[in-house]
Image (spheres, helix red, strand yellow):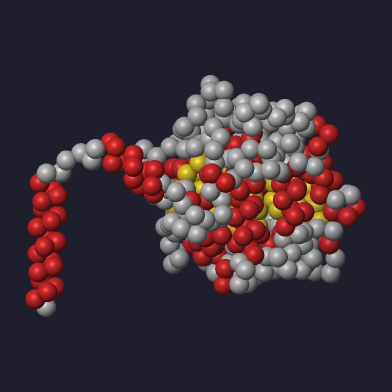
Amino acid sequence: MKLLGLLALAGTALSHAHHDDAEVVPEHLRAELLKKWDQEFSFTGHASFAHLKPLKCLVEPDEHYDIAVIGAPFDTAVSYRPGARFGPRSIRAASARQMAGTAYNTRAGINPYSAWATVKDCGDIPITPFDNALAERQMYEAFLELGSRPAITAADSKYGTKGISAGKAKLVTLGGDHSVALPALRALYQIYQKPITVLHFDAHLDTWNPIRYSAYWQSEQTHFNHGSFFHKASREGLICNATSAHAGLRTRLTGVDDGDYMNPGPEQGFMRVHADDIDELGGPMGVVDKLIERIGLDANQPVYLSVDIDVLDPATAPGTGTPEPGGWTTREFIRILRGIEKLNIVGADIVEVSPSYDNKGETTALAAAQVAFEIITSMVKAGAGEDLGGWYGRKETVEEPKEVKDEL
Ligand SMILES: *[C@@H]1O[C@H](CO)[C@@H](O)[C@H](O)[C@H]1NC(C)=O
């Protein structure tokens, strides 16, 4: 007791002394500390995304960025296995080997964390698990707040995307169950003032009329679920019906035939690429061509990229709420993502990562962190101010090999 008291006193005295002559730390000491300790290994530090400085941008109105990573830990709108509220944490932990100094993306020919863009990890939205109507509103307000802040790179800069998203910040959301896409689309509609093109990678349609889950027991809130959010979004006029697409589908449908595909309404607003189509289309680049043909490369039409990790086969991504065998491999999917890098992506999500069903190698979270890396790479590459070539898989369009510099 005595010893503890003494220590406490000593502590107070010391902190007072420190406080009284709170001198400015000399620059050379600061520089030395930086030289010695401003380094991380992949396994050190706070578990932020890609070792970015952990921030809570929602309570820091002065935080600006070109690209913000934001967690949406929400999973009370699922129809099968819950647990995706832990997705953001697991994806961040699995992103540990992405560090600015060692993140050159050879597939794309750019290091997204060391190029023109300021990328920040903005932390999580504190979403209530007790009231989904309130959760919907919290997510919408958070996405609108973060997405409305002017980007660090101004519209007239050499860098940054041109067209409708010039000067605008881009959000990459780590889910959370898939229903987080509805408030995200509502916010984007507010920001861009026009229906958004949706490119949706998923085993499932997610355009289902909510009566699919229960025709009798319904309420306004049962309509907000992770299988019907695109139905709702479409009916609200948020989705562009002429340019949107599903890719990677292999879900079971309702009833005794493929009538779900014929439903008038939201189903007709999406082109469908099935998981198996990759064979008929001659591989990932065939899928890419089909998607680009549908979506187009119009700089004035915003595209939202929504990735349900269950688009991947459960062999690599078992940690998800509604797994469906027969999906694409991580390699195929990454290749498709690289192939669509020229789309005008203004926002994205990676959802349905549910770590309690993941394996010891955390392959689902790893895949999700890699998907986020590829998407962020595309966003940065799109604003590089020059054509960097390297559209992966189309090597014939890549520029001449660079000359070896003398000093090397
Ligand atoms: C897309 O189609 C749906 C269903 O027909 C409709 O409710 C919605 O308003 C359409 N969206 C737009 C932006 O026109």
Residue under the image location 47 percent in, 38 percent down? 65
Residue under the image location 56 percent in, 35 percent down? 115
* Residue 162 visible in the snapshot: yes
Q: Position of residue 199 (x, y in %)?
A: 70, 46
Position of the N terminus by quadrant = bottom left
- Vertical side of 407 occupied by 279: above or below: below
Q: Is residue 315 left or right of residue 358?
A: right
Report how many numbered discs are placed on residues in the image.
0
Which of the 4 image quadrants contains residue 177?
bottom right
Farthest bottom residue in view: 1
- Vertical side of 61 occupied by 327: above or below: below
* Residue 322 visible in the snapshot: no
Q: Is residue 204 left or right of residue 293?
A: left
Q: Position of residue 60 (x, y in %)?
A: 36, 43
Which of these two is toward me, 71 or 243?
71
Q: Position of residue 97 (x, y in %)?
A: 56, 54
Residue under the image location 65 percent in, 47 percent down? 374
Q: Position of residue 327 (x, y in %)?
A: 77, 62
Q: Is residue 148 left or right of residue 389?
A: left
Residue under the image location 73 percent in, 68 percent down? 315
Farthest front residue in view: 407
Which of these two is toward me, 71 or 369?
369
Which of these two is toward me, 26 or 268?
26
Position of the C terminus by quadrant = top right
Q: Is residue 347 left or right of residue 28?
A: right
- Vertical side of 381 occupied by 261: above or below: below
